[in-house]
Amino acid sequence: YTDIPVSEHALQPRRGGPKNLPIAEVLVDDDDCPDNSRLKHKPKLVILGSGWGSVSLLKTLKPEEYHVTVISPVNYFLFTPMLPSATVGTLEMRSLVEPIRRIVQRAKGHFLKAEAVDVELSEKLVEVTQTNPKGEVDHFYVPYDKLVIGVGATTNPHGVKGLEHCHFLKDIEDARLIRNSVMMNLEQACMPTTSDEERRRLLSFVVSGGGPTGVEFAAELFDMLNEDLGRSFPKILRNEISVHVIQSRGHILNTYDEALSRYAEARFEHDQVEVLTNSRVKEVQKNKILFTQKDDNGETVTKELPMGFCLWSTGVSQTDFCKRIAAKIEVQNNQHALETDTHLRLNGAPLGSVYAIGDCATVQNNVADHLVHFLRSLAWEKGKDPEKMQITFSEWRTVAQRVKKRFPQAADHLRRLDKLFEQYDKDKSGTLDFGELHELLLQIDSKLTSLPATAQRAHQQGQYLARKLNKLAHATPGMTANEVDYGDLDDAVYKPFEYRYLGSLAYIGNSAVFDFGNGLSFSGGLMAVYVWRSIYFAQSVSFRTRILLAMDWSKRALFGRDMMSY
Ligand code: FAD
């Protein structure tokens, strides 16, 4: 595109693509690039999304190497780990967001506040929509040489009816709605016209999902009710309020070390937060929740819980945009995320042109394969033939810990395998042979072992991809992706992505738990809370947000939370 003037943003009059839409050539002037011919040939890098993956990519990318365009329906980056604190006013919402344009500016890029709706893979065009001030929806294409999909995921409905009566917690707007809804219930409960039964219902708060988000929200809610309710709502008695966590598995925080799950459960029991384990929500109605639970005889019984507020927080699923892309590619069979190879390239897309990172993507892995691999290495280390080796329970635990460190989300599988190991070992000799262990592995569905949907993973993938893109720009000087037959250039210039588990933390109400993997864990009271805060304070995206966080924490300590809706 040598003839096109290099301008801040030029929507070219030309149309094209399968839908004959306008094509927006987004080129960014770059005074720092001394070689003008190189500037003209800089590849167009289009990044979809302004979340964890995209921001970490932008922060590591060398600005002079690409014409960068970021497309996202929101013009901010959201620091999600602290979002539960914003739902009850512990932190203010503006303290958790950073304008994305500031970050894009660093990469000398261009930002479009719009939504990607489709990708024409063969023509390298992203279809984008944006609602104009007249309320009309404009469609146009943005061409790319390299496309990075980092659009995150949406809440998983698990096919349950009545989710329109629930709140979700994914975005800053969700936090605002939750805050208003909690306040409205408290206000309504104080009305002289509200009956006792209605009052109890309004003050029954249910969290569906015992993962970190659900647990942290329940903890924040509990803190607010304990610390600020009496001052602002003296007419409401603490024992009229109930907080319930419904969890389908046997424990809350089930991807954490078992000791931490138990610690969190004990803490909730002490704080009178009811944890209903082995329970599955069947239906959500306007005023109550229906759920099934196994009774003492192992029979499944249906129970109901009156509620005035329900948070639905039960994992993530694919966005419509990702489903549309997956449907176009024959080899994309995963229902939950776009599949990539270990170079983070979208499987089935033209090689080296489309990458997917963060929650919207999964790198194909298999726990059983990794267990077998580690067991084989263990055998070779001992100079034994793996197929004939007797594996002791403690050897098995060592291998399981190594696998768990790499795939924390496999914790449940490994626990089930522990139990199977014990059952299988009927003669109590404490050993299994390799063949027997293989049989056990077949009993678990080990294929669902994608990497965890965490900011940690999205951040690492963004950083990895930026480093690789920096190298790729030099590996193909003066060439765009169209002009060169790459072969497997990604593989030639950079190593495959490897996830490093750095630990998980969760706030559980005036105490916090830390799981560093490999059996290393830590939990505690106020001291742990300060460590928890310091970690997130340090990770916060800018100096500006750090100042705001410090101000919010000080304000809350001095004056309590603002008990109002807005
Ligand atoms: P996101 O950060 O979700 O960003 C996706 C971006 O894509 C957004 O900007 C969105 O607007 C944009 N987008 C969506 N659709 C389109 C489209 N069609 N076109 C263009 N752009 C689009 N992880 C941790 O590791 N630790 C924690 O403590 C933790 N706590 C969490 C607490 C909460 C309440 C939540 C919701 C999540 C938490 N997570 C945590 C998970 C973490 O936030 C996600 O794993 C992480 O945000 C994933 O990053 P991402 O870049 O893939 O997607």
Image (cartoon, rainbow, N blue to C red):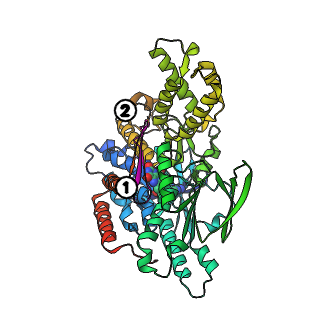
Label 2 SS: helix
Q: Pointer 1: residues within 10 angstroms few (<14), some, or many (20+)?
A: few
Mark 2 residue type? Ala
Residue that mark 1 sits on? 525
Q: 57 left or right of 200? A: left
Where in the figure is residue 349, as x and y percent of width and height?
A: 56, 39
Q: Is residue 20 above or below residue 564?
A: above
Mark 1 residue type? Gly
Residue that mark 2 sits on? 475
- Point out the tag, 2 or 1, that comes first from the N-terminus: 2
Where in the figure is residue 289, as x and y percent of width and height?
A: 66, 64
* Camera sees residue 149: no
* Camera sees residue 338: yes
Where in the figure is residue 308, as x and y percent of width and height?
A: 60, 72
Q: Is residue 22 above or below residue 387?
A: below
Looking at the figure, which quarter contains the C terminus? bottom left
- Read off the magenta span: 499-520
Residue at 30% in and 51% down: 30
Q: Is residue 231 above or below residue 217?
A: below
Label 1 SS: loop
Residue 34's quadrant in the figure? top left
Residue at 60% in and 34% down: 419
